[in-house]
Amino acid sequence: MLELSHGANTALPARRMTATVSCAVPVDVSALLVGADLRVRSDADLVFFNAPEAPGVRWAGDGGRQRVDLDLGAVPADVHAVLVAVSLTGGGLSFGAVPPPQVQLTTAGGDPMALFTVAGLGPEKAIIGLELYRRADRWKVRAVGQGYAGGLVELVEAHGVEVDDPGEAEAGMGAAPPGPAVGAPPGRPVPPAAPQGPSAPQAPSSSEVGYLERCWLVWEDASRSLAGFRSSTEHALNIRNDEVTGRVPRGRFDQLMAAADQRLRADAEQLRGELARVEPHVTAEAAPFDAPSWLTWRPRTDLAEGMLLGRLSTVELPDLRVPLVLRAPWRRGVWISRGTVPGDAAAYAWSLVTRFLAAVPPGLVGLEVIDAAGLSGAGWLNALDPSGGRLLGGGVATGPAAAERLRRLLDLVDLRRIGGPDGESPSGPDGGPPVRLVVVMDAGAALDGEEAHGLLRLVEDGPLVGVPVLLVETDTPAAESVRAIRIRQSCNNLPSSQGAVGDSWVGMDWTLTPEVLPDGGDGSRAPALLAHVLGAHARTIGSSG
């Protein structure tokens, strides 16, 4: 049987198992079915003695000893994890006053699988013992040990269960029904980035396979390993305080830190190995710009899986750089924040445009560049479209032409939404390509202009009908207005210089290093690779019609 320490995880060899708890005093065992944000979907996802069954999870009692029987194959696909919780039944005790409880997993036949001794507890009256979570098509178990001094009521509220009367519920949850009254989950706050700051792009759907999903799974595993390491470090520091004051013998702190560091390094090595096996086979749009695949790039005949945005790193894992990837074509807008150096945002924007074009077949997508102030220096685009305007939609729109271009795009979006003439044809009413990538330069100024409401409509409605939007915050910082916040909440937010991106699983902050064209400069001249990709698209479009 494998003994787990704080934060440790391991693969589960079976789908059917039982979770039990050993403790010197009576305890209640319960379970929560949660999503990737650690929130329940509804009150039915809390499984305990008064609500003993949910899909794949069943509570049972045997002579006073409680258990949770699990059939992970029957757990709904939108449930990311099952949390096994342990709570004291007596009102006066805390876990710090009794020997550490042990949470054990056994197979359906009774064979031991994993054991977690939850040591180092103090005023906590309820704990999350184990987390059984999905990893691709496998299940893993993690030793959590997170405690709640407020007991089971605090624990379930932290995971999205609303308790109508915490005082009465706490008294009733001791050892007998009726237990807590549950209602609509209020939604546990998770730590995403603030609306005006960088936030993690949406993950690909669970049905997607291949390189994109692998990258997101590696990021998730790395985030959870990092969270476990930080939790173990915090636990070890508490032990060190006890060592310094003489309450416990010295040496345990060093042992815990060494074990936590060893686990983190082992996890990182495994994840680096996963990436190393697949990255040599990645096609250009998902590879660094200096990768050999760009030297042999040719226009695609099919839509690529997605594209690379940059690399994620953290100080605790200096040798692990996780690719941040995004599905193509975009289903949400993308907001690029101003960088530390003028021109960073424009350089990153044209880098993403290059990847977007490399990810789609010629004729499928056209660029619609809007620069109302005309200060972006992107006029060089006008000379790069020998396709007669079909690729660049008539060139960069500035001044009054910018407002007219926006109105034309909104008309296209409206036609597609209501299934008008454009619903019968893959192209627009003007005969243009079916996908229009709209690049809005100096987005901060655009949000202060007269057409700001139209821009909001375009960002919210356009991506789902083939009109994705890339907003580039270059010269004018975006004001902290309701409209600006709403637009950024509708977008994947990316820093154009090294900046923080928060994951959507455990709220760890990672540093994103954007992948930028080597000659991107400040965006005032054509990067060579972008000109090459645009030219290949234009030539293919010209030869076909």
Image: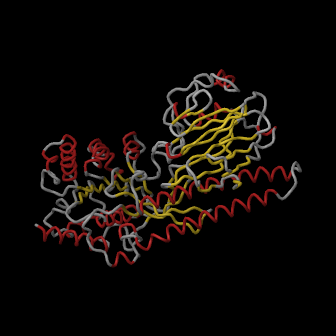
Colour pattern: secondary structure
**Rendered-image quadrant of the N terminus:** bottom right
Q: Residue furthest left?
A: 545
The location of residue 531, given as percent across then percent down, is 27, 72
Considering depth in this image, is 405 or 316 the residue closer to the camera?
Answer: 316
The location of residue 449, given as percent across then percent down, is 29, 46
The location of residue 391, given as percent across then percent down, is 19, 63
The location of residue 245, given as percent across then percent down, is 87, 50
**Rendered-image quadrant of the C terminus:** bottom left
Determine the residue positioned at 42% across, 55% down: 337
Considering depth in this image, is 458 or 185 the residue closer to the camera?
Answer: 185
Determine the residue positioned at 62% across, 29% down: 49
Q: How many labels were placed on the picture?
A: 0
Considering depth in this image, is 481 or 138 the residue closer to the camera?
Answer: 138
Left or right? Give the position of 205 relative to 67: left
Depicted 181 relative to depicted 452: above or below: above
Depicted 217 relative to depicted 119: above or below: below
Considering depth in this image, is 296 or 130 the residue closer to the camera?
Answer: 130
Depicted 490 relative to depicted 258: above or below: above
Determine the residue positioned at 40% across, 47% down: 488
Left or right? Give the position of 489 relative to 110: left
Left or right? Give the position of 436 relative to 421: right
Left or right? Give the position of 508 relative to 407: right
